[in-house]
Structures are given as structure tokens and as C-alpha cells.
Amino acid sequence: MTPIKLTVSALAVLAASTSLAAARDQIQITGSSTVLPYSTIVAEAFGENFDFPTPVVEGGGSGAGRKKLCEGVGENTVDIANSSSRISQSDIDLCKANGIEEIMEVRIGYDGIVFASDVNGPDFALTPSDVYLALAAKVAKDGAIVDNAVATWAEVNAALPAQDILTLVPGTKHGTREVFDIKVIEAGCKDTGAYDLFLAAAAGADEKEKKGNASKACLELRTDGKSIDIDGDYTETLARLETDKKAVGVFGLSFYQNNTDKLKVATMSGVVPSTESIASGDYPVSRPLYFYVKKAHIGVIPGLKEYIEFFVSDDIAGPDGPLAAYGLVSDPELKATQEAVAAETPMGPLE
Amino acid sequence: MTDISAAPDSHHRPRQSLLSESPLTRRRNAVEARFRAYGVIAISVSLLMLGIMLFTILRDGVSSFSQARLSFPVELSESVLDPKGNRSRDEMTKVTTVGYGKVIAAGLKAELERLGIDTGDLSEKDVTALISKDAAGELRAKVLADPQLVGTTIPADVLAAGRIDGFLKGRVTMETAKRDSNVSPEQLMLAERLQEAGILSSGFNWDFLTNPDASDQRPEAAGLGVAILGSVYMMLLVLVMCVPVGIAASIYLEEFAPKNTWTDAVEVNISNLAAVPSIVFGILGLALFINFFGFPQSSSLVGALVLSLMTLPTIIIATRASIRAVPPSIRDAALGIGASKMQTVFHHVLPLAMPGILTGTILGLASALGETAPLLLIGMVAFVDNYPAAPAEGFLDPATALPVQVYSWASRADPAFIERSNGAIIVLLAFLLVMNVAAILLRRRFERRW
């Protein structure tokens, strides 16, 4: 073939493919990497049991996923965004600006966040205060704020092992970090009384701003190498923990449940994390997981409505379904979610 | 002139035998010996690194090429699979994989009873957990494709669950099973008995090369089918798009373009493009091909367009170098006997430059094959469970690529995926090896030196 013929055929192929660039027949899902495994489990089962193609599921993070959802309406935009935190007002505004008036919010269940250490190491029975005292940059001591200088867990709490402090916490870009900050660090900050001292010292025009600054001061973690931010996913945390057996890592419950032969989980305020203790609310560190659906795509993308209904059905998201088996804490209010999905109720304004 | 010979060295240096080394010679020889040693050390260090990398990949990945399977007869009970008994496909689609799972579980139970295998204290659910969750879907597809199978007993050859597969490979042991919430030592003991009875056996894992990806709950069913297909589609498209454009651009720049500031600027830009980080092409691809042209996300067409942008500079640089290597005498001779410029280029220069062009193209393709970053932004780093259709329509279907599969498996929770991820690296390395060997062979076979 001469180069000219080659070029012509290449252009022909291109032209042919562009003319085909219409009708998308599979659902496109993107967003949180925490929700990703649940989403793929459902997508796979959906593909097996329905005559629709299996949805394509991408990871990439909650925030990025919601932005992609709000890019606009049309076949080359995604249908569903998975999210491990609630949608923000700025996302809703962006959606509005791009012509997306109605979004459906679907809460699929809860996810627990656990502390775990090497399986052969000592047991850890933590409380938010312990974690705060071990990791915060500044702590309260005799009624004053001082730099944190503790070196071992036993110095924090005599009941804990005499082991050097080294914790692997999710990096700030993770949705998990937000829960860790609020449910563990800030709670510990308040329990130890450091919050009141921060509040007394906080600068700010009014009470609200002062409180905000005090909370911010609580969340500052020490930077002397005792607390390490992990920007990758849990597999990276696990790899670091395997090289340094003394480390304590922060994981999702489902990740821990898949690696119980390598990890030992720490109790939090005396409660062992499990789907049951999280469902009952006894285990404090958990958060809801969501996905957001572009309502305008229902009826346009084949199978979208069926997929959502299938996702929240008792067989899938219920306490005996495959998602619970993988580590999702099923939502006690699943019934209400199912009804909202069936009626295609869009979400109201954020409270 | 005469004072050169009048200033002999012997005047400054003592006379010395040629056979004994002077201190200076010794120093020079020592420098050379040291330099050679550095070379050997450098080579050894890089070989060692390569060795370590290959060793760890092979150690962790080779096991993914074998897979445990259970084989036992399954009675496709009509009362479960086709309650109305009319063998109509539409009616039968109402039965979900849950129903098929029960049929398989009943088949295994019957076989265990027939062979008198003791299941110990294990509950029925625990026994069924030995079978991969993928089996039900596979059986359902098979039965729906041929509804007449209902009511008969067929030999089923189903995947064993990931932990059982890991047990046969030595990844899961009785020790780890004690602490593992997904498998118990009793289940492993049952697996041992099944192995003795010949129900459970391990064989070469063709599924690993042909199956699509699978969810986190069934690592044993995950395969590279979609990824290999996606990579092949993209390489084909990259070839079709890059080679004509690349060669045409090179010929024009080398043979026809006037040498001026304008062509100099083009040249600098091409060299610069070759050094641009690949993620930049991904950002461009998202903005241009998906958002502006409206091509479908996650499709191999968009992937190929992005990779083409990335490969084009490499191909142009290689092609120009090999066109330049054709001696001017060839051109002069052709022109001298009356060939036009066009004839000179296409009849003489291009065929002689072809081996170099081919080598450059293959190496460019090989680097495109291993690229992940730009695909991240155009939605190809995804869970894709359906095979893309045949070309040309299939170029628009969602697909993944080999390096993408390595990346997405490496971040999954189940340790069985780490093994798969390394297995995928082995497959990718095999592809790269074939391409690089082809490049070397082509060069050896056709290269001409002047």
C-alpha cells in the first residue's frame, strides 16, 4: 500500500467511526474509590441478570466524580457519580450553571473507618482522646497548650503498648480523612479539653469564626514523622505497614475484612468495628456513602432506572446482600431510599 | 623543521626498555582498567535491578496462570430455572443468578453425598462458598443461550473461590485461614478432600487471558480479555493514524521543505513534543476529543487518538533520522538519470529508509502500549465487563488497556488481585518483548550500511 492509500483509508476509518458516535447504550459511572468496589459488584451482577450491558465504572475520587457529573447533560457526560461524602452547594451550583436542574441522591449505606496494626503485634484499644494525644501537633498540658512530645503509645495511655508511635493516616485529598478528622481528632480534642484552650486563644471577629479557628487548630497533626499522610489507597498503607510492623494504619472496614490475615483491628472506645456495631451506632467512626444520579438521563440511557433500583434492592444492598458481605453497613432506612428511587424523587436543597 | 628532530625525548627522559612500563604508562593503563571496571559495575547494577524486578514480578505473578476449578455434574432443575416449563427465553430471564447459584450448590452437595465426602461441621453455605460467585452468571448465560439444556444434567466445570485457589497455590495456608474472615481451616480441609476425590483440580488458566475484568468479590474470575482487546485496538488505530502522517511529515521536512526559520521552528516543536509528559496529552484528549468532538468516553478510539499524539513525534524523529541516513549519492543518481524529485523519494529513498522507519514505529508503539497516565483522564481506567464489538464499531465501545488493568488491580483490597496484577505485568512484558524483538530482527534483516 502506498502512503497515500494508507492516509485515505485512515481518514475513512476515522470518518466512519465519527458517524457512529451516537447512542451510548451502557451506563457510565464515576467517582469515589471507596464506593468503587461496591459499584463494580452491583454493575457485574446487573450485567449478569439483565439484558442491558454492564455499566462502566471509574474511580478517581468523590470530588472529581461530582464535578464530572455536573459537566452537563448529554450522552458524552456521566450518568452517576459515586461519592463518599455529601454533595456540596458548590457542586449543586455548578450543576445548575450547566443546565442540570434535578439530581437524585441515593444513600447506599455506611462505611466504617478502622485503625489496624500488624496481626502479630500487640492489641490496641484506642479512644479518640488517645489518638488525639498521640497525633496532634499541640496538646493541652496542665491548662496550657504545648507542643506534642510523646514518643510511645504507653506515654499517652498506660494501658496501651509501649511501642513507638507511628500512624499512617489518609492524605487530605481522601474523603476518609474528613471522617478521621471530625470523628476522631476533633472528638479527641474536645474530650481532652484542648478545644476549650484553643477556643480561648482563637482569633476571630465573632463566636462562629473563633469556633472555626479552634476546630482548625485541633486538626493540625504533628509533622515530626510520627504521623504520615498516605496519598495513595489502602494497598499503599498496607504495604507501608508490612515494612514497618510498628505502624498503625487507617483503613476502610471492607479493606480490613479482606485482609484479616495480615491486620489486627483496634477497638475504638471499647467497641470492635463490625457491620453490626456500625449499624447500631456503637462504633463511632463511620460515614454514609452516596451516589448521585442525573435525572435527565433516566429514560435516555437504557437501563439506568433499572440499575438504580437494582442497587438499592434488598437482595443487593440489604443486610444479607453481597454488599454487606463485602463490608458495607446496610442502611436501616433502605425502604425510604427504595421508595424515593422508584418515584424518581430529586434531592431538595441542602440543609 | 629541523629543530623538531633536534629535540628528542631522550633528552628529558631516561632511556628505558620498551618491555617495562614507565610510571606514566602504568598510570594511563590503570585509568583504563578503572574505567572498564566502572563500566562492568554499571552493567552489573542495572542487570541486578532488572533481575530483582523480573524476579519479584515472576515470583508474585506466575501463579496467576494456573487456576483451581471444581468439576461435578449439575442437574438443571426445571422447577427452579423454568417454572412455567415452556423454555421461553423471556420467561427464563426472570430467574436471576441467585436461582442458578442454588442449582450449582445442589449439584455440588449431591456429588459430595454420592462420593461420601464428609463435610464436617461446615454449613451448606460454607460448602457453597468454595465455588466462585462467578459460576452462577456463567451457567445462566449458558442456559439462556440454549434453553433446551433445562431438565438435563450437564457436567459443570466451575471456578473455585479465590481463597481456595490461593490455598492450592500456597498463598493461603491453614495458619492464615485461622485469622481470615473469608475462609476457615475447615473449608480448606474440605478442599483437600475434594482434591483427593478429583473434584478440585488446578490447570492452566486460559480465562486469565480471555475473561473480562471481575468485581472485588471474585478475583478468580478476573481476566485480561477486554484489556488485551483494547490494547490491540488502540495499537491498530495508532498504527493507521501515525504511520501515514508521520512518514508524510518526515518526507516533506527532510526532502521538500525549504530550510528557513519556519521549518526550524517546526523541528524544535517536534522535538519538544516528544518530551512532553504523557498526562498532558490526556488533558488535551479530554478537552478536544471528548468535550469538543463528542467522541464517546472510555472508547479505544479516543485512547488511540491520545496515544497517537504522543507517538507521532517519536515516529517523525525516527523516520527523519533514517531518511537522512540514505546517502545523497542515491538521490543524485536517481535525479541524474531523469527521475523526478517525487520518484526519487518514493522509488529510492523511502524503500531504503524503511527498516529504520519500521524500527522507530515499533519502538514508538511499544512505548504507547505501556502508557497509563493519559488514559486516566479519558475514562479508560475503569471497570469494563463487556467485550468491545468487532471493528470498526468496536472502536467506540468502552475498553481498558493492559497497563490500566495492572494499575486498577494493584489497588484492590483482595490479595488475590495482587497476584493478578503481577500476572498482567508478565503479559504486558511478553507483548513488549515480542515488539522489541521484532524491531531488532527487522533492523538486522533489512538494515543497510553505507
Image: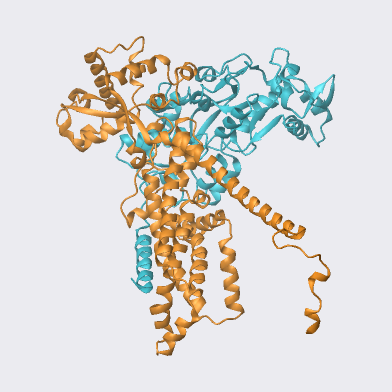
Chain colours: A cyan, B orange
Q: Where is residue B235 in the image (x, y as percent from the top left)?
A: 41, 56
B343 shown above or below B124:
below
Q: Would you say B44 lies left or right of B135 here?
A: right
Q: Where is residue B282 in the image (x, y as percent from the top left)?
A: 52, 54
Q: Nearer the viewer, residue B350 or A308?
A: B350
Q: Would you say A306 lies left or right of A152 here?
A: left
Q: Where is residue B126 in the image (x, y as percent from the top left)?
A: 36, 17
Q: Which residue is drawn at 59% across and 38% down?
A: A232
A27 shown above or below B150:
below
Q: Which residue is drawn at 37% across and 66% down?
A: A10
Q: Where is residue B297 in the image (x, y as percent from the top left)?
A: 44, 51
Q: Would you say A164 lies left or right of A259 here?
A: right
In this rendering, the count of numbered labels is 0
> For the N terminus of chain A, which image quadrant?
bottom left
Q: Is residue A80 visible?
A: no
- The answer to which quarter of the image holds residue B139 is top left
> For the C terminus of chain A, which image quadrant?
top right
Q: Which of A72 and B282 is in front in this view?
A: B282
Q: Which of B189 and A319 is in front in this view?
A: B189
Q: Would you say B151 lies left or right of B131 here?
A: left
Q: Can residue B378 be seen in this view?
A: yes
A242 shown above or below A16:
above
Q: Residue at x 75, y 20 (%)?
A: A192
